Image (cartoon, coloured by chain):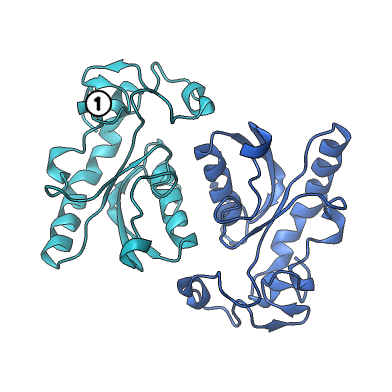
Chain colours: A cyan, B blue
Amino acid sequence: LEPGGSAAALGHDVGRLRPAIAPSGQVLRACRAAGMLAVHAREGHRPDLSDPAPAKRVRGRFPAGIGDPDPMGRILMRSQHGHDIVRKLAPAPGGPVAHNPGEGAFYATDQAMLRSRGIAWLIVCGVATEVCINITVREADDRGSTASCWRTALARISPNSSRPVLR
Amino acid sequence: LEPGGSAAALGHDVGRLRPAIAPSGQVLRACRAAGMLAVHAREGHRPDLSDPAPAKRVRGRFPAGIGDPDPMGRILMRSQHGHDIVRKLAPAPGGPVAHNPGEGAFYATDQAMLRSRGIAWLIVCGVATEVCINITVREADDRGSTASCWRTALARISPNSSRPVLR
């Protein structure tokens, strides 16, 4: 979400996404104050490029692709600075962070997030509404959790911002 | 999609969904003529109700729920007539049919549909655009396949039909 990060290097307009940061921080702080578990999830890949599907690497008309260099390291690579969670929303030390190689936060992630903790209710914040948030909410639903979104803590990546994707 | 079937018994307006049938049949016949594999997927549950998540059973304001009686058997139950695929779109004898207990055709299904056959390209038809089709296309994407939809072979379950969910 910062200039020079993975999303910007892929050619996305991060200015469209950044309005989700402050409200997400408010939700995060309120949840922590209430003793709720906060789980961070981010889309990213192994540096050996073993996990992005071939179709994912060639798709779109982006100026750069997964694993290419960006000003903060390599695009969408685990452990690279451009893939870090923005400082204002940083996980607690040792807090759970899921690495998801897909857009959905539940597909092939290394966190058995919900089942192992018996979590039935989720509040979802982040970006982008019509991509990762959309599929993550539906994945949670199929897995038996009830997911709600905090409307102001979401942001769309597409300019067609008047079209709702979640209700 | 028929009066008395599972969707109707749940309270959905199946008249809104039926326009997808004829175009889906055209796509199905064209694909068969071209020697392409046709896979049917349908949302449904085991008769012992072991697989719908509790949240799924209580959600919504439907007049009836999963497993309740309907005019064709029991709602969204495997092997019940109300859960059959409509005759015009019937699978070939012995053809692959996925039983998916979620809305996504890839979650917890008993068909390892894509990977075991090395399928990279999909044409998706069916209902409902903003629910099962939406998540299935995104699931396919995360699994490395490129999914396209046949626009006229889809139908929405919601009355807000002017709002696109897929582009």
Q: Residue at x 57, y 43 (%)?
A: B137
Q: Compared to B31, does A74 lie above or below? A: above
Q: Amino acid at mark 1?
A: Gly
Residue B156 drawn above or below residue B81:
above
Q: Say above or below: B123 vs A33.
A: above
- Foreground: A105 or A161? A105
Q: Position of residue A158 (x, y in %)?
A: 41, 36
Query: Which chain is mark 1 on?
Result: A
Q: Is residue B161 visible?
A: no
* Label 1 secondary element: loop
Residue at (33, 24) in percent of width and height:
A47
Q: Is residue A99 left or right of residue B116?
A: left
The residue that appears at 88% across and 35% down in the rendered structure is B33
Question: Foreground residue, A64 or B18?
Answer: A64
Mark 1 lies on residue: A5
The structure residue drawn at horizontal position 24% and vertical position 33%, both measured from the top left corner, is: A1
Q: Relative to B28, is B85 above or below?
A: below
| Residue A6 found in image quarter | top left
Q: Quadrant of the C terminus of chain B?
A: top right
Q: Position of residue A13 (x, y in %)?
A: 32, 29
Label 1: how many residues lie within 10 Å, few (<14), some (14-19) or many (20+)? many
Side of A16 relative to B108 (left or right): left
Residue A87 can be seen, yes or no? yes
Quadrant location of the N terminus of chain B?
A: bottom right
Q: Quadrant of residue A8?
A: top left
Q: How many marks?
A: 1
Question: Does B85 sit left or right of B67 as displayed?
Answer: right
Task: From the top left corner, tell me how far across and down residue B81 is, in percent.
Answer: 79, 72
- Within the image, what quadrant is residue B108 found in? bottom right
Q: Position of residue B28 (x, y in %)?
A: 81, 43
